[in-house]
């Protein structure tokens, strides 16, 4: 009632209605436990898609199968995953990469935000672009492997500044943390310093960045030397070819000169012979002219002598012309031979010079190669000195349990738990770890998805292994389920070779998809439960083989014509027929866990309320409304709410002794819908009615 009724009038008072609506919790948030290339080891990280997993944890990784399971989860309909990264730091190291540059008060020390060799790809530099003179500077950090970069503007080394670099990196950076304590403020009036800026916008100042810069310079020098070597080698080959051609040309010229010399000698001899013949013919004519011309015989002799002279004159003229031409040709060929000899000399010298240049270029190229190798070795050594490590294999099952429980204790809620093989060797998860995980899931009202051992390569091996006295599986109980066989998928780290992979991620995705489409009470199995991204199964099962495994509580993955690969089982690891457990079916168990978690969270308001009839009525009202909603959604069997559920909270459930102890008891019963695992169709032949 109102605090005080003083003056006459109307007073308004709000009366509580007693309605506290209970909201159903999520049903398919899946926790994944395993090793990743990067990411937080101090808290679980929620991702809502595989892109988020790539961004936070590096995506698929050759050293772990966790990334494959997460990928399959999102491919098959999963929407929210909680990632718990396992990490065993090397002895004496945190495993996180460290970057350092500068000296004294101006020293910059950065640690990768999480351990792993991924941190070895971090590079950093300082710039003062746009920063006022004084203490402020800009810090640029880049992750070369993920092509991500951060620029933190206007930060200070000093702890009293509102933009202290340590605080800024903790708030804003997803790559690094400040590695040392910030500087204390200087004495009054004392100077404030800032790190030295990088010489250029592309220069990195950390040791690995500087080494890489030198390697890049050496690479450029090598490329220039390669060009020079190619040019010099080409010039040497051309000079050698020219020298060969000049030598051949000189040989040809010498041979032509020798031929001209021979021709000249022959022509000269012929001319001398013709001249001798001409002189003799001239003398014969002169002698004939001295004879008595009146004598007919002398006249005939003179005539014959004159004819011989004419003939000798013609031959002498021809020989003279031939000798003149031969002399001219000889002189031309002689000059040509001289010129060819000079060209050969010049070409030989050019060849020698070009060969020397090629040798020098080759020597320079070798030197550049050596310089590049040295620079690359220095860069690799600098990167190795960053100290990033992917960690050791976890030392024990107990250590794994401690790590994932510590992380999952910080998770508000998860419904499914997947622990794919986490060792570098790909060995199976130990059965004792599955036992511990199943117990933890029971405490957290979740379900563990157990992967079949890698030794189960046949149906006989699976049946024998499941029944073995020494447990090969682990996780036996109502809060766990196993699916057989493993998946056959390509491994991109091994040239897409087909290997077997754990099915937990695929199954979790199918369960999430079914929850979203039909509800947690619908079995995540059947023709609708197709496996996406699964080209084949490691073992093909027949109906008869399926019939051997199903009564044991081993859920099968099947491959059918047209339909493809599907989930074909919906039992828990308490679902063997011989156990006759009320939690035989996985959808029944998951519905119960859903109701329990929703009521646990939705009835917190009851704590410290007066424990009497009014409270009991409110509890019945709100819990009943929640159960009625489930009935209307088709989660419960029965034609009426009375047949589907009951909520009891009264003096019968909460006695006076209970009230004296501060206890209120609420009893909730429900009739779950169980999956139609076996469909029996009866066919009968109708007979004609016989006359009576």
Image (tube, rainbow, N blue to C red):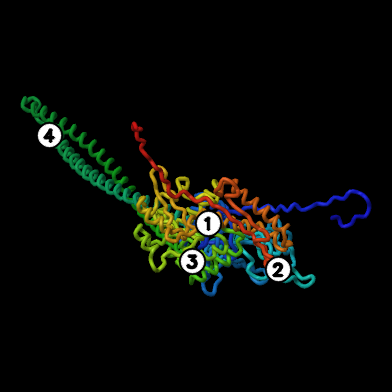
- Between the residue at mark 2 and the residue at mark 3, the CA separation in whole angstroms equals 39 Å
Q: Which mark is residue 284?
A: 4
Please name which of the two marks, 4 or 2, marks the residue nearer to the observer. 2
Label 1: few (<14), some (14–19) or many (≥20) C-alpha neighbours in 10 Å: many
Residue 224 visible in the picture: no
Image quadrant where one finds the N terminus: bottom right
**In this view, which residue lies farthest toward the right?**
7
Q: Which mark is residue 589?
A: 1
- Between the residue at mark 4 and the residue at mark 2, the CA separation in whole angstroms equals 177 Å
Q: Residue at x 70, y 62 (%)?
A: 607
Please name which of the two marks, 4 or 1, marks the residue nearer to the observer. 1
- Between the residue at mark 1 and the residue at mark 2, the CA separation in whole angstroms equals 34 Å
Q: Which residue is mark 2?
A: 660
Quadrant for residue 349, please give it: bottom left
Please name which of the two marks, 4 or 3, marks the residue nearer to the observer. 3
Percent across and percent down for residue 614 are: 73, 57
Q: As rendered, which of 311 and 477 lies closer to the eye?
A: 477
Percent across and percent down for residue 461 are: 35, 61
- Between the residue at mark 1 and the residue at mark 3, the CA separation in whole angstroms equals 18 Å
């Amino acid at each position: 009632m109102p605090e005080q009724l003083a003056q006459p009038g109307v007073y308004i008072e709000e009366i509580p209605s007693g309605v506290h609506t209970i909201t159903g919790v999520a049903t398919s948030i899946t926790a994944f436990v395993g090793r990743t290339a990067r990411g937080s080891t101090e808290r679980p990280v929620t991702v809502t898609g595989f892109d988020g997993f790539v961004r936070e944890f590096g995506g698929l990784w050759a050293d772990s199968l966790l990334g494959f399971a997460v990928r399959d989860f999102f491919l098959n309909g999963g929407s929210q995953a909680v990632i718990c990264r396992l990490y065993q730091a090397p002895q004496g190291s945190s495993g996180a990469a460290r970057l350092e540059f500068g000296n004294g008060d101006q020293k910059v020390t950065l640690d990768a935000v999480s351990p792993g060799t991924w941190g070895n790809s971090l590079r950093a530099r300082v710039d003062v672009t746009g920063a006022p003179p004084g203490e402020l500077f800009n810090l640029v950090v880049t992750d070369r492997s993920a092509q991500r970069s951060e620029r933190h503007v206007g930060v200070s080394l000093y702890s009293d500044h509102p933009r202290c670099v340590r605080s800024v990196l903790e708030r804003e950076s997803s790559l690094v943390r400040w590695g040392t304590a910030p500087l204390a403020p200087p004495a009054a009036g004392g100077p404030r310093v800032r790190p030295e800026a990088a010489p250029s916008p592309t220069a990195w100042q950390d040791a690995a960045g500087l080494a890489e810069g030198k390697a890049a310079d050496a690479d450029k020098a090598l490329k220039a030397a390669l060009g020079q070597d190619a040019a010099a080698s080409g010039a040497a080959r051309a000079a050698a070819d020219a020298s060969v051609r000049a030598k051949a040309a000189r040989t040809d010229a010498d041979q032509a000169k020798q031929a001209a010399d021979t021709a000249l000698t022959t022509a000269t001899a012929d001319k001398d012979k013709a001249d001798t013949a001409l002189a003799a013919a001239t003398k014969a004519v002169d002698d004939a002219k001295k004879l008595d011309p009146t004598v007919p015989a002398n006249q005939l002799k003179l005539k014959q002598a004159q004819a011989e002279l004419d003939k000798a004159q013609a031959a002498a003229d021809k020989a003279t012309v031939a000798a003149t031409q031969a002399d001219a040709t000889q002189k031309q060929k002689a000059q040509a031979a001289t010129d060819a000899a000079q060209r050969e000399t010049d070409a030989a010298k050019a060849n020698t010079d070009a060969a020397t240049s090629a040798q020098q270029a080759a020597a320079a190229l070798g030197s550049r190669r050596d310089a590049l190798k040295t620079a690359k070795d220095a860069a690799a050594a600098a990167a190795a000195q960053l100290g990033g490590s992917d960690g050791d294999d976890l030392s024990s099952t107990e250590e794994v349990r401690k790590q994932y429980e510590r992380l999952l204790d910080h998770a508000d809620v998860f419904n499914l738990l997947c622990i794919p093989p986490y060792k570098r060797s790909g060995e199976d998860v130990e059965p004792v770890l599955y036992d511990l995980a199943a117990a933890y899931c029971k405490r957290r009202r979740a379900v563990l998805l157990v992967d079949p051992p890698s030794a189960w390569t046949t149906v006989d091996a699976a049946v024998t292994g499941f029944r073995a006295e020494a447990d090969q599986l682990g996780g036996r109980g109502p809060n766990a389920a196993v699916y057989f066989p493993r998946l056959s998928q390509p491994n991109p780290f091994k040239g897409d070779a087909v290997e077997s992979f754990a099915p937990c991620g695929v199954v979790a995705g199918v369960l999430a998809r079914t929850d979203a489409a039909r509800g947690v009470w619908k079995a995540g199995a059947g023709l609708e439960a197709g496996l996406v991204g699964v080209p084949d199964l490691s073992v093909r099962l027949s109906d008869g083989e399926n019939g051997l495994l199903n009564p044991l509580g081993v859920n099968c993955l099947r491959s059918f014509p047209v339909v493809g690969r599907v989930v074909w089982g919906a039992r828990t690891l308490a679902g063997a027929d011989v156990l006759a457990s009320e939690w035989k079916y996985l959808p029944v168990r998951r519905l119960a866990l859903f109701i329990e978690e929703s009521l646990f969270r939705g009835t917190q308001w009851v704590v410290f309320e007066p424990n009497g009839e009014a409270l009991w009525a409110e509890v019945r009202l709100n819990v009943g409304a929640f159960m009625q909603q489930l009935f209307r959604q088709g989660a419960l069997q029965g034609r009426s709410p009375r047949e589907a559920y009951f909520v009891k909270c009264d003096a019968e459930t909460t006695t006076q002794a209970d009230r004296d102890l501060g206890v209120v008891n609420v009893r909730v019963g429900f009739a779950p819908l169980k999956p139609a695992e076996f469909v029996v169709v009866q066919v009968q032949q109708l007979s004609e009615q016989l006359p009576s």
